[in-house]
Amino acid sequence: MKALAYGGPGKKAVEDRPKPQIKAPGDAIVKITKTTICGTDLHILKGDVPTCVAGRILGHEGVGVVDAVGAGVTAFKPGDRVLISCISSCGKCEYCRRGMYSHCTTGGWILGHLIDGTQAEYVRIPHAETSLYPIPAGADEEALVMLSDILPTGFECGVLNGKVAPGSTVAIVGSGPIGLAALLTAQFYSPAEIIMIDLDDNRLGLARQFGATHTINSADGKAAETVKTLTGGRGVDAAIEAVGVPATFGLCEDLVAPGGIIANVGVHGKKVDLHLERLWSHNIAVTTRLVDTVTTPMLMKTVQSKKLDPTRLITHRFKLDQILDAYDTFGRAAETHALKVIISA
Ligand SMILES: [Zn+2]
Ligand SMILES: [Zn+2]
């Protein structure tokens, strides 16, 4: 089968690989119909994720059709259409029993990281019963690809951890796919203001279409001041960090109101400063989270009932044999205006 393999920092190639086989009774083999590329894949390619070794097939998002199941799988059978969660969970370990699938002792984020992933014609999914979701008849499968990772990530790590509430004020720093996923799902709770901050005017324009009440281009270094002006000098109740660099985390520290929450979503590769000399008395909280994907079934219902339209995040479409072009387009998002790319196998 064709697959996109990581070849060490800066290297990737489309390779011919053997079709994966069932290794454990809980496994399923899924024939991929649609997958996508994540910002995390670009982090891996930069060498930021040393636990991902050369030779790994990348990708942790996608939908497909069950091709084969292990002897222990009763919830799915060949032919079933399924959504693949970016987080594998056994459903039985202490963390899984607490709903913290991201820290499953035999799962978590392993797909396209510690085991071969979804940017291929087939993928082996461990703990299939608790890591796959049945796709309802008639569902838009491209929309559901957005539920493998970015929508639960924006929602759980940003909106839920940030305790977005009716009438509250929210700032989302970063208007990429994850920031926009947080923007879409924050609106479940009717906050009074959602301020989107980014350096890219195209992405800020999309943010306004997606429901942002204000947008700020932070290139002038005055974003925190502008937020203070917009909020009567207070700052925001929830500052959602959706980039993962020191400057954007620092900005969240500057614009969070007393009593507010900094909800970190970004993948950080470098240390950041926590300004406790200023914030110690501000009653704030800082939260971090690796997405658990516990909200995937709920999000699927909101997509089915059209309360949420994740297809708005899809900008480009490719075939699997054009995946290097897809990486190029996704990697040059400022020029190509790419958000999420759909890759059909
Ligand atoms: Zn991802
Ligand atoms: Zn577990």
Image (spheres, rainbow, N blue to C red):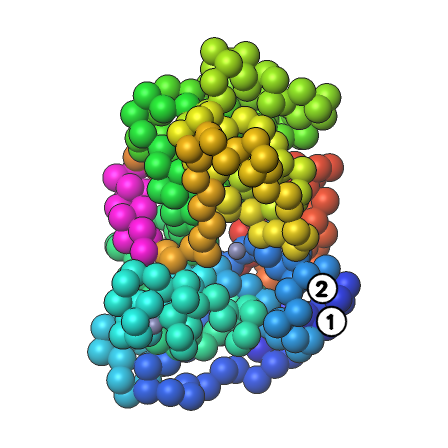
Measured as percent of width and height from the top left, residue 270 is found at: 68, 52
Q: Mark 1 and 2 residues: CB-CB less than 8 Å, in contact?
A: yes
Q: Position of residue 303 (x, y in %)?
A: 32, 43
Mark 2: is the Cβ under 8 angstroms from ligand 1? no
Q: Look at discs 1 and 2 and give the one toward the viewer.
A: 2
Given the current orientation, which residue lies at the most extreme right position?
10
- In the foreground, 127 or 327: 127
Q: Position of residue 18 (x, y in %)?
A: 57, 84
Disc 2 element? loop
Image vertical order of residue 127 relative to residue 252, above or below: below
Magenta stretch: includes residue 252 = no
Majority SS type along the magenta span: helix
The local crowd at label 1, few if under 14, some if 14 to 19, many if 20 or more residues have their Cα within 10 Å, is: some
**In the figure, residue 112 lies in which quadrant?**
bottom right
Is there any visible trace of residue 206 in the rendered image?
Answer: no
Residue at horizontal 37%, vertical 19%?
192
Instruction: Name the residue located 47 percent from the left edge and 50 percent from the top edge.
Output: 288
Secondary structure under the numbered disc 1 in the rendered image = loop
Residue at 54% over, 51% down: 342
| Residue position for label 2 | 47
Which residue bears the numbered disc 1?
Answer: 8
Disc 1 or 2, which lies upstream in sequence? 1
Could you tell me residue 299's position as x and y percent? 31, 46
Q: Of residues 41 and 312, which is closer to you in this image?
A: 41
- Identity of the amino acid at label 1? Gly
| Distance between the alpha carbons at the discs numbered 1 and 2 | 7 Å
Q: Which residues are magenta?
A: 294-306
Which of the four quarters of the rendered structure image does ligand 2 lie in?
Answer: bottom left
